Amino acid sequence: MSFFLNIPTELQLRVLENVSVDTLQNLLVTDKYFNSITLSSIHSTVNTLTASDDRFYFSVFSPQVKTHLIQTFNTTCVSTPIQNSQINTPLKTESDDKTLLVDLNRVSEKLNLISSNSSLFQSMNYNSNPFSPYKSVFKLGDLQYTRNPLKYNSTNVPANEDSTTSLSLVVNEDEPYINIQFEMQMKKDISSDNLSSLFKVHSRISPLKEIGASSTGVLYSDDKAVMVEYSILKESEVPPYNGYDYDVFHNYKINFGNIEINNTYLLDCIEG
């Protein structure tokens, strides 16, 4: 891929801004140089996308939640910048006028074309990706919207009360699991209030045995590209509704911590 290596680093980075996420993933495992410059490009793109605290939103829902509503929180990206390794750039002389004639779109198209030949690259998924530690970490902010999933064509309603980043649940003691659904959403147009879904994660937590018991854990997406920290507390028993109510229910509270998302997975969801 000398056509790419023979242009200055700043132009290489501009080219990488316009290639597909599949191409970026393939370049990550090409060699040390491509790994370094591709990571730099990915990090720069993610930094730009997450610079605003009013762009990414995180929704959480459980069929066992008291309010029966989907709760949507704003988020803040709190990840630490990646310390990229030094990039060894081919030297260019001041008189090299070819640099001025580079068609960046054509170079991007050529990279995408080469990358589409799967036989040239090893297959890779997010679970086995050796660069999966390069993630963005999001922290939940305030409750922004609620939505009733049982209503046809239900839309987000601005929240009219303060809320912590937690769910209050009522769980039957015979239930084997607490079911949780997450959804990451994004304002692709920062000037609009419309939210686009990036991905959904369905997971479950085992109920606790004793009242007052607590536990912490991590929920993963199937491909391990998304990780959500949580803590769970088993609270009091719910009083029976009448003398013929033999089902036993308990109150639970689940708090959510950091959300970690693989950067290439995040870009892939946005691109899709």
Image: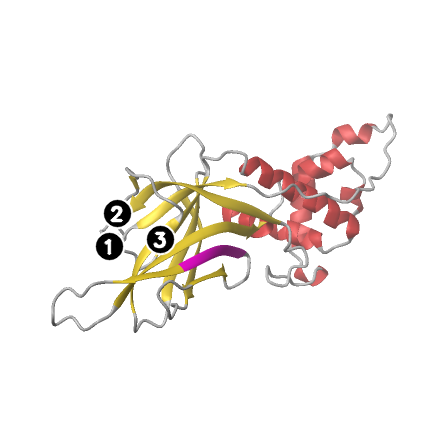
Q: At label 1, which amino acid type do we have?
A: Leu
- Looking at the rendered image, the disc whose residue lies closer to the viewer, 1 or 3, is 3
Q: Is residue 228 magenta?
A: yes
Q: At label 3, which amino acid type do we have?
A: Leu
Q: Name the side, left or right, on which 231 lies relative to 101.
A: left
In-front residue for pair 178/233: 233
The x and y percentages for residue 125 are 60, 61
- Looking at the rendered image, the disc whose residue lies closer to the viewer, 3 or 2, is 3
Instruction: Examine the rendered structure and indicate whether residue 33 appears above or below residue 76.
Output: below
| N-term mark: 3 or 2 | 2
Quote the CA–CA distance across marks 1 and 2: 8 Å
Whether pointer 3 and pointer 2 mark residues with C-beta atoms closer than 8 Å, the reply is no
Q: Name the side, left or right, on which 69 lies relative to 133.
A: left
Whether pointer 1 and pointer 2 mark residues with C-beta atoms closer than 8 Å, the reply is yes
Residue topped by disc 1: 150
What's the image's color scheme?
Answer: secondary structure
Tell me which residue sits at (48%, 35%) in the image.
Answer: 53
Dot 3, how many residues are within 10 Å of its Cα: few (below 14), some (14-19), or many (20+)? Answer: many
Secondary structure beneath disc 3?
strand
The x and y percentages for residue 161 are 29, 39
Secondary structure beneath disc 2?
loop
The x and y percentages for residue 75 are 46, 41
- For the record, the magenta segment spans 226-232
Q: At label 2, which amino acid type do we have?
A: Ser
Instruction: Examine the rendered structure and indicate whether residue 78 appears above or below residue 222.
Output: above
Quote the CA–CA distance across marks 3 and 2: 20 Å
Residue 64 visible from this viewpoint: no
Tell me which residue sits at (60%, 47%) in the image.
Answer: 20
In-front residue for pair 203/113: 203
In-front residue for pair 104/185: 185
Residue topped by disc 2: 154
Secondary structure beneath disc 1?
loop
